[in-house]
């Protein structure tokens, strides 16, 4: 059985430090089967070289020194911070800073970036790679799946149609083409594994959109609420005077430790029209949150003037697009119930 490998970019400009890494990697790889993975290293000596490698190679992680030479070979500085910012914004890779000037690392905005003191040696860095291994390998599998689907549909569906647009409209096409490619891939992957979804797919945490949207989850002192006002009303300023939110009641005590049959019944909204099931998820520490029942009979109307402070500022998560329609459909069905009169038999 082949041992999995991690592609690591080492950004370092001192020969002695590069040699130390290569020696450590060689020692690690000699026992790769027991370690569970091997390390393949690419070296860059400057921010410019590292950016070029990031652009051209499929990497899993980068290990960055803060003090790096510049193009004009000026005195070493903290340009490693600039590379961390660039990588964080443009590439889904694990990032570690390995330096003797840890106090200069600018990571307040990037809590997932690890900082290692060079004085402690390289063992902690390789332990960190081991902890990230499963996620990085799954992420690589995700990239491979996206590329396979892109290749499968590109010539059959996208290429023949978009070539006509490219002739007349060269500027501004890239975002539209990207959306169309992603829509193809998304629709195809929805059928993967028989259409089964992981609970984590239900949410964007935190929300991706800056403005309030249908399906946004809001935490306040009174608990958790979900926005049920229609999206078209939220998108147009001044269209509504209030935004309606529904109460979310935690049902973890009814969920945890129960049989698959009992959990399935809950996931089907417990056969109650007045509520909608939201699955559990894990926080950053791996602690379960939820699940919840959205209570369509427990609503609150927030005046538009209070929305920025009460709702937008307290958004915690949002439902992903494929799960918003079921919420809206059930909400509408609940209020569209009319019922029939009770007739006397006498």
Image: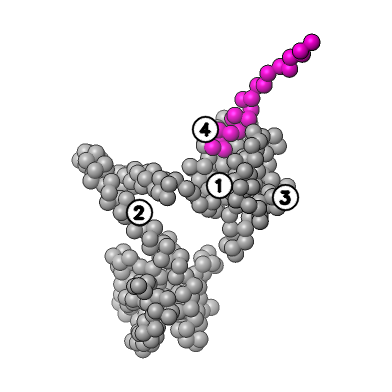
Q: Is residue 312 left or right of residue 90?
A: right
Say which label, 4 or 1, has the lower sequence index.
4
- What residue is pinned by disc 4? 232
Say which label, 1 or 2, has the lower sequence index.
2
Say which label, 2 or 3, has the lower sequence index.
2
The residue mark sitting in front, 2 or 3, is 2
- What residue is pinned by disc 1? 318
Q: Which of these two is toward me, 101 or 228?
A: 228
Instruction: Please tell me how crowded label 3 is: few (under 14), some (14-19), or many (20+) other residues with Cα within 10 Å.
Output: few
The residue mark sitting in front, 4 or 1, is 1
Instruction: Please tell me how crowded label 1 is: few (under 14), some (14-19), or many (20+) other residues with Cα within 10 Å.
Output: many
Q: Which of these two is toward me, 123 or 277?
A: 277
Which residues, given as a range, are shown in magenta? 326-346
Tag 3's secondary structure?
loop
Name the residue located 64 percent from the left edge and 25 percent from the top edge.
337
Q: CA distance from mark 2 to mark 4?
A: 31 Å
Name the residue located 37 percent from the left edge and 45 percent from the top edge.
188
The residue mark sitting in front, 1 or 2, is 2
127 lies above or below 345: below
Q: Find out whether the residues at labels 2 and 4 contact each other: C-beta distance under 8 Å.
A: no
- What residue is pinned by disc 2? 146
- What residue is pinned by disc 3? 221
Quadrant position of the N terminus in the picture: bottom left
């Amino acid at each position: 059985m082949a041992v999995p490998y991690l592609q690591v970019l080492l950004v370092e400009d001192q020969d002695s430090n590069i040699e130390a890494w290569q020696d450590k990697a060689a020692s690690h790889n000699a026992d790769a089967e027991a370690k569970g993975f091997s390390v393949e290293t690419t070296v860059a000596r400057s921010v410019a070289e590292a950016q070029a490698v990031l652009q051209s190679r499929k990497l899993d992680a980068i290990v960055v020194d803060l003090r790096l030479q510049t193009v004009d070979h000026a005195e070493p500085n903290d340009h490693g911070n600039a590379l961390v910012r660039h990588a964080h914004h443009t590439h889904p890779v694990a990032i570690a800073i390995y330096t003797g000037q840890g106090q200069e690392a600018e990571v307040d905005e990037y809590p997932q970036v690890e900082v290692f003191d060079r004085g402690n040696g390289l063992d902690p860095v390789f332990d960190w790679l081991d902890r990230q291994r499963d996620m990085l390998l799954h992420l690589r599998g995700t990239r491979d799946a996206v590329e396979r689907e892109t290749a499968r549909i590109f010539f059959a569906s996208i290429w023949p149609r978009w070539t006509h647009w490219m002739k007349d409209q060269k500027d501004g096409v890239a975002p539209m083409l990207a959306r169309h490619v992603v829509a193809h891939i998304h629709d195809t992957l929805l059928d993967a594994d028989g259409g089964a979804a992981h609970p984590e797919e239900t949410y964007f945490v935190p929300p991706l959109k800056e403005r309030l949207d249908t399906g946004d989850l809001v935490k306040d002192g009174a608990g958790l609420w979900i926005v049920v006002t229609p999206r078209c009303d939220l998108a147009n300023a001044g269209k509504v005077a209030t935004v309606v939110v529904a109460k979310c009641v935690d049902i973890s005590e009814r969920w945890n430790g129960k049989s698959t049959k009992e959990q399935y019944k809950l996931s089907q909204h417990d056969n109650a029209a007045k509520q909608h099931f939201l699955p559990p998820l894990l926080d950053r520490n791996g602690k379960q949150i939820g699940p919840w029942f959205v209570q369509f009979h427990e609503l609150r109307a927030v005046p538009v003037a209070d929305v920025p402070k009460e709702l937008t500022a307290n958004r915690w998560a949002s439902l992903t697009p494929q799960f918003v329609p079921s919420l809206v459909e059930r909400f509408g069905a609940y209020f569209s119930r009319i019922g029939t009169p009770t007739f006397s038999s006498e």
